[in-house]
Amino acid sequence: MDSELVHPSGVIGYDETGFSAPKITVAEGNGEPRADEHPQIPGWFAEHCPIWPGEAHFLKVENTCFQGKSEFQDMLVFQTSTYGKVFVLDGALQLTEKDECSYQEMMTHLPLCSIPNPKKVLLFGGGDGGILREISRHSSVEHIDICEIDTMLIDVYKKYFPDIAVGYKDPRVKLHVIDGTIFLNSVPKGTYDAIIVDAFDPIRPDHELFETQFFELISKALRPGGVLCIQAESFWYKSLDIEQLLIKSRQIFKGSSDYAWTNVPTYPSGVIGFLLCSTQGQHVDFRNPINPIGQENYGVSKYPLKYYNSEIHSASFCLPSFAKRNEAKSVAKGV
């Protein structure tokens, strides 16, 4: 399905009823626009999400490539002049061709370069195929499972983002169209060397996942000394308490836990974090990669690494002073 997404205002936005242009609300009494409403800017996409109140991010739309709805979610693909093609899911920007490398490469190589010779890897979400593409650069990997429930999403990525969805061409990849928790319940204990979760909103200490059995199931599916990487909140948001996040994760996984981050200009605040955990067993020092990967490692990709290297791996754990103070508390407590 190819279609132009056109609105009289020229603004692409999103609300509970579908894609639409946001409206300017005039406050009673003074005729001024309300502060919580953003202006209509013809020809621009606006992402504004209640998870990060008080801000919106705009991108100029050159043309709309695709708009559709699967059984699970709304999808939008449009072309920009500065960030290439953009993919939007239920109104939330997922990736752009320009800066997807910083997220995909870091989320993959931070865990996989921290352990020797990973052989079996499990991915939840990541339906765009970018993390699969990055896993393919590791020659020690023998098998890659991916759980993704929305096959239409995969098809859209394959059509409009072939250099990202190329990860599906790796013969080691096996796609499971199934809910992640159901899949985990069928996995024998100690199956995986690494599990990457790219299927939820950024994790915070109060995230609903901590109230479910999901993390317990992941810890059982990992071998001793196996590692998890999951998207975590940006340190720019008050909703992230690094101390509490590390405390909670260590209570579940019993090994080491750490917080890293990377720059993604089109994400809220321009920064996204990663929570890295290991199960009890051989100690994992996430800050010092022991399984280096170089520019010669292409896997199924047409291109060498664009963002990740061993130096930026270690540097990604360096925190600004205001965030470092919180992280230091958990270290001092020995938890």
Image (cartoon, rainbow, N blue to C red):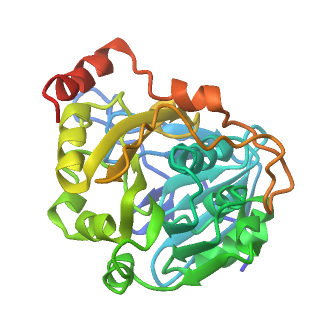
| Vertical order, 203 against 145 (above or below) | above
Farthest residue in the front direction? 282
> Which of these two is toward me, 305 or 198?
305
Image point 44% across, 21% down: which residue? 318
| Vertical order, 26 against 302 (above or below) | above
Image point 47% across, 62% down: which residue? 193
Q: Is residue 3 visible?
A: no
Image coordinates for residue 160, horizontal then vertical, percent: 76, 66
Farthest residue in the top direction? 321
Instruction: Point out the image quarter for the N terminus.
Output: bottom right
Image coordinates for residue 145, horizontal then vertical, percent: 55, 75
> Which of these two is toward me, 261 or 195?
195
Image coordinates for residue 171, horizontal then vertical, percent: 74, 78
Is residue 217 rendered to the left or right of residue 141? left
Is residue 226 rendered to the left or right of residue 68? left
> Which of these two is toward me, 82 or 198?
198
> Which of these two is toward me, 105 or 156?
105
| Vertical order, 137 against 167 (above or below) | above
Image coordinates for residue 335, horizontal then vertical, percent: 17, 36
| Vertical order, 245 against 108 (above or below) | above
Quarter of image, res 26? top left
Image point 31% across, 21% down: which residue? 323
Quarter of image, res 259? top left
Is residue 205 rendered to the left or right of residue 306? left
Q: Is residue 96 visible?
A: yes
Is residue 234 rendered to the left or right of residue 159? left
Image point 22% across, 46% down: which residue? 250
